[in-house]
Amino acid sequence: MYTQSFNVPDSPGLKAVPLAPSTENPELQAHFDSKIDADGKIEPQDWMPEAYRKTLVRQISQHAHSEIVGMLPEGNWISRAPSLKRKAILIAKVQDEGGHGLYLYSAAETLGTSREQMLDGLHSGRAKYSSIFNYPTLTWADMGVIGWLVDGAAIMNQIPLCRCSYGPYARAMVRVCKEESFHQRQGYEALLVMMQGTEEQRAMVRDAVNRWWWKCLAMFGPPDADSPNSAQGMRWGIKRISNDDLRQKFVDATVPQAKVLGVTLPDPDLKWNEERQHYDYGQIDWDEFWATVNGDGPCNKERLATRVKAHNDGQWVRDAALAYARKQQERTMKETA
Ligand code: FAQ
């Protein structure tokens, strides 16, 4: 549904930033720059500027945290799914999100940061994760809407990341996007079924769409003009399409889907602009977005406390796995001695 060709042109406006001159090693820097300019891939063993490494660790670890915190709003509904079929689908989806977190932590580890460091950043509240997971899931219709809109927005943002300049991140994203595509379709299908059901079910879907629509538009990040990381991220080939351009693509793709579903998106300013060949849409509440990103959303505290508890409760599993690995290593060393 959201498939974008991998050769969609990059956002033009943000590519003009010159590469920052390196004080580290001009020769290696020149080699790095030429690889980026030729749209090549940077691999873990390659030299890279420290700022590039830091930016990637920031973005990939935030992305990983989003995937695992993102398991929580839907995880809450596994025990309340309306049928065995829906329960099996939801369990599979939530497990997939956990898997995405693991690929992404592994990709970030190739940049020299440890999983412990990243998790410490999350658990202490220093690291960010996507704003969208700080909202509550009030009814079963929220499961469908998360699949349709949240996964839909995630795919729109992540397809260009399959072409990201850092090899391990780009490769991880290919599989992630395939799985997100299934997530999006299962959500949309669940909503289609509800819309063909009772009036009560239709009302539930409309209410969920109304609550999630604007939050999903904010997922793409601040407007380009207020996005401190975009220009450099685009120059390095990490980001390929700007926050605003992705948001617009999402709106354009979603409006026809809403029509098929039979729901109205909660925006009186949403209308087709013949001249721009895009939908115009209304103002996003950026104050609410920043309050949520900075820890004051409706569920921030609950989400973080749940993650910290899960981590602490799992300590014995990590201890046991390490003890087992040590034992295996000692045995191998004895056998080879
Ligand atoms: N929430 O300068 P920019 C999913 C922060 S995965 C929180 O534009 P950048 C799957 C940003 O980090 C969803 N913070 O930053 C799923 C930066 O702060 P910093 C996650 C946000 O990096 C579905 C500051 O604002 N996807 O949904 C948000 O160039 C269902 C300034 O922003 C990814 O992480 C936000 N929405 O662009 C799972 C994709 N937006 O770090 C379960 C990878 C911005 O300077 C269930 N990430 N900020 O302190 C990206 O593509 C980029 O990092 C952006 C932000 C586009 C998110």
Image: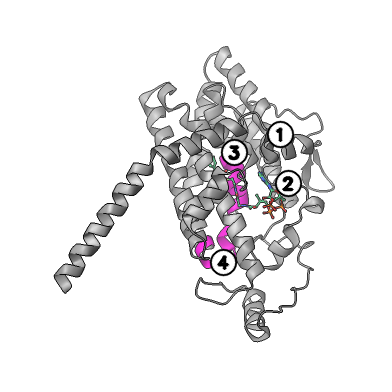
Above/below status of 149 relative to 180: above
Residue bearing mark 3: 150
Viewer-nearest residue: 180 or 306: 306
Front tag of 4 and 3: 4
**Which SS type dominates the magenta stretch?**
helix
**Residue of label 4:** 166
Image depth: mark 3 or mark 2 in front: 3
Which numbered dot is residue 214?
A: 1
Q: Which residue is at the front of the view, 95 or 297?
A: 297
Which of pointers 4 and 2 lies earlier in the amino acid sequence? Answer: 4
Extreme residue toward the bottom, this view: 27
Name the residue located 78 percent from the left edge and 36 percent from the top edge.
Answer: 287
What amino acid type should be assigned to the residue bearing mark 3? Val
Instruction: Describe the element under mark 3 as helix, strand or loop.
Output: helix
Q: Which is more N-terminal, label 3 or label 1?
A: 3
Queried whether the magenta region covers residue 158, the answer comes back as yes
Q: Amino acid at mark 4?
A: Tyr
Q: Which residues are drawn in magenta?
A: 151-169
Residue 261 x/y as whole percent: 60, 29
Residue 255 at least partly seen:
no
> In x, y percent, where is residue 216?
66, 38
Query: Gap between marks 4 and 2, in whole Å?
Result: 26 Å
Of the numbered discs in the image, which one, if any, rests on residue 248?
2
Mark 1 vs ligand 1: CB below 8 Å? no
